Image (spheres, grey):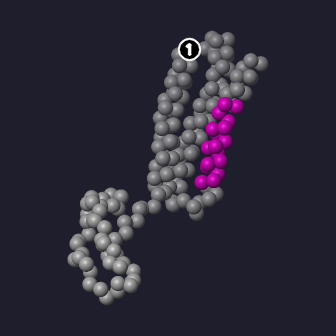
Amino acid sequence: MELFGYSVLQIGGELPTLAVLVTGLVLAAARRGRLPHRARTLMLSGIAVLLVVGLLGLAWNVAVPHLLDLRWAGGGTYRQYRLFSLAVGVLWAIGYPVGLGLLVAAVFAGRPVAAPAADWAGWTPPAGDDEGQPDPAPQSPAPPVTQWGGSDLPAPPATPDRT
């Protein structure tokens, strides 16, 4: 009875993670039109890998006490247990980062390319009451634009009010 309680505890601990992964898999498959093809493929692959790794880890954690009980009662070797444990550990250690990496790649593959910054050098002021008046100063070329759309140059001094 004690092994049954351990198994229920392991399943209960892993169930929320598996529920989230299955929900994500269903949503990604059902809502195909909301994601670009490449992002959807990466997302489905990442969720599938994480789901397989989670189920493998859960199966191993549930089976270990039963295997150890049978092995020692039946005269099995500890070496076989170590090899199985090592194999599951290696698969988990490789599968989890791969699945998570695929999910992260899906996030970035689904992002649209940023639009170019607005061309403020071609901006003209709206028509106002000084229409037809000569410009008070000649226009200088547009200052170099930084990464965020600002300028490296200090702001020009304010022009005096001509009213």
Q: Which corner quadrant of the image does residue 113 belong to?
A: bottom left
Q: Residue at x 54, y 59 (%)?
A: 35
Left or right? Give the position of 162 relative to 92. Answer: left
Left or right? Give the position of 118 relative to 85. Answer: left
Against 62, is 162 above or below? Answer: below
Work out whether residue 73 or residue 148 is closer to the camera in this orientation and state it: 148
Q: How many marks?
A: 1
Q: Secondary structure at mark 1?
A: helix
Counting from the top left corner in percent of width and height, residue 44 is at 55, 50
Q: Residue at x 51, y 24 (%)?
A: 86
* Magenta segment includes 15: yes
* Magenta segment includes 152: no
Left or right? Give the position of 98 relative to 142. Answer: right
Mark 1 Cα-neighbour bin, 10 Å: few <14, some 14–19, many ≥20? few
Secondary structure mostly taken by the magenta-highlighted segment of the chain? helix
Residue at the disc numbered 1? 78
Q: Which residues are magenta?
A: 12-28
